[in-house]
Amino acid sequence: MINTRAANRYAKAFLSITESKNDLMIMFKDMSSVKKAFEESHELKLFIDSKVIKDNDKVETLKEVFTDLSIQSTNLLVHLMNSGRIDLFDDVAKCFVNLYNEKVGNQNVTLISATKLSDELLREIKSKVKSLTSKNVHLTNKVDKNLIGGFILKVGDKQYDASFKQQLKNLEQEFFNTSIQ
């Protein structure tokens, strides 16, 4: 919780700095690639969180891993190192991407279904979510064979679970509650 708060503060500060310099899109691309790299590599997260490795070494390694970073993003790295908060780099990137999306009106939506949905159905769902949120919707369809049927729709921090798996769990809980009374 404390790290998230600190990361959010750093992200807000760098958002306002890059916004005033009109470098917002550059910083967004950088932070998106950083976020993606940390999501895909558990080792990278372990490396940055390590208390054994010196912060200078972490920064130099991160500069080598992220060779395409802009000057602003490199400055963020150095600033985090100087503040003794280099371990927040991935969290700052996540927070920055979220704040950017909020600012420009983007909404990431994940639709989890038992099978791959048709493009037509995905367009309809995207249109419906767009009308409900009044934001630019980026829809991702993931397949989870364990759902049996139905879907789970994640919009921001909200989740609508209309899967058969969840309905069966609800029914089981209802039977359990009824048998106890």
Image (cartoon, rainbow, N blue to C red):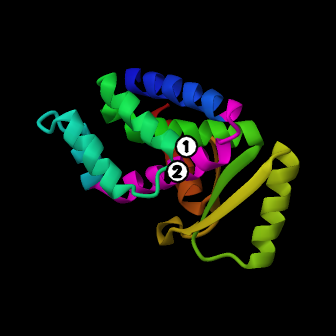
Query: Residue 13, relative to residue 28: is it above or below?
Result: above
Q: Which residues are magenta?
A: 19-42
User: CB of mark 2 within 8 Å of CB of mark 1?
Assistant: no
Q: Residue at x 86, y 44 (%)?
A: 134
Under tag 2, what secondary structure? helix
Q: Is residue 47 above or below residue 55?
A: below
Mark 1 lies on residue: 174
Tell which circle, 2 or 1, labels the residue nearer the N-terminal end.
2
Q: Which mark is residue 30?
A: 2
Name the residue at 18% across, 38% down.
50
* Image position, residue 43 (x, y; %): 24, 54
Which amino acid, mark 2?
Asp
Q: Is residue 4 visible?
A: yes
Image point 44% across, 22% down: which residue?
6
Residue 77 place in picture, x, y as percent: 39, 37
Image coordinates for residue 40, horizontal then vertical, percent: 38, 59
**Could you tell me which residue is drawn at 11 percent across and 36 percent down?**
52
